[in-house]
Image (cartoon, rainbow, N blue to C red):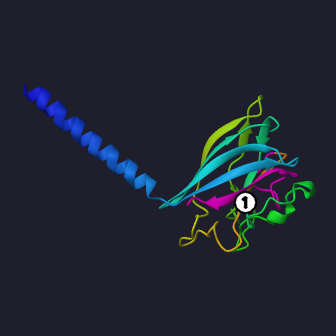
Amino acid sequence: MKQHFLIAVLMVCIWMVLGATHVEANEHPRATIGFIDRDGHDVGAGVLIDGPHGVLIDLDLHGLPPGRRAIHVHAIGTCDDPDEGFVASGGHLNPEGRKHGLMNPEGPDNGDLPNLIVREDGTVQVELFTQLVSLQGAPGRPAMLDYDGAALVIHAQRDDHYSQPIGGAGPRIACGVIHADE
């Protein structure tokens, strides 16, 4: 009988901890993102969650060319110019003017992220984490949701994480504007 009581108490404790974790996770600022390609077609979506040490980026993409593709945080929240290659989104979010590249001793800049790996069927499902930015601003981490917003931009090639100015990532092939989750 004591074992059943202890198991019941343990189950209640686990439920309380998991329930508190769930509530706490939902209190973090969130943002959403929808991606389009150069033809203006929908190529996926994502959710960004601002945590105490960085931003979790959860992406579900489709319709991309297979292979490794660079993805970066760009400084301006617009994707209104697909015909011009999404250049209106500006350069990387990089207020301190650091060098590009996660492996660069003079970097990274705040817009640097690991490469995506697009499957043969053109899909990506991934969670990325970056300690280089925040949604609303934090010490040492510039805000993506500032006065002019920010965008995530996917490039045609992989990022070598070192070369200037963008790691050899090539043209921009998809773009998504980050929107505060209301």
- Horizontal side of 155 relative to 179 (left or right) equals right
Answer with the quarter of the image where residue 91 lies.
Answer: bottom right
Q: Main secondary structure of the magenta part?
A: loop
Measuring 44% from the left and 58% from the top, which residue is drawn there? 27
Tell me the quarter of the image containing the C terminus: bottom right
Residue 35 image point, x, y percent: 74, 49
Q: Which residues are magenta?
A: 158-182
Amino acid type of the residue that numbered disc 1 sits on in the rendered structure? Ala
Measuring 79% from the left and 46% from the top, which residue is drawn there? 158
Tell which of 24 and 91 is nearer to you.
Answer: 24
Tell which of 32 and 71 is nearer to you.
Answer: 32
Measuring 47% from the left and 61% from the top, which residue is drawn there? 52
Relative to 138, say whether 9 is above or below: above
Residue 56 image point, x, y percent: 56, 52
Residue 11 image point, x, y percent: 23, 35
- Kindly identify which residue carries mark 1: 151
- Horizontal side of 140 relative to 97 (left or right) equals left
Answer with the quarter of the image where residue 89 lies.
Answer: bottom right
Residue 114 image point, x, y percent: 68, 49
Measuring 84% from the left and 65% from the top, which residue is drawn there? 88
- Horizontal side of 15 relative to 127 (left or right) equals left
Tell me the quarter of the image containing the N terminus: top left
Tell which of 100 and 23 is nearer to you.
Answer: 23
Residue 172 within the magenta-colored segment of the rendering: yes
The residue at the far left in this view is 1
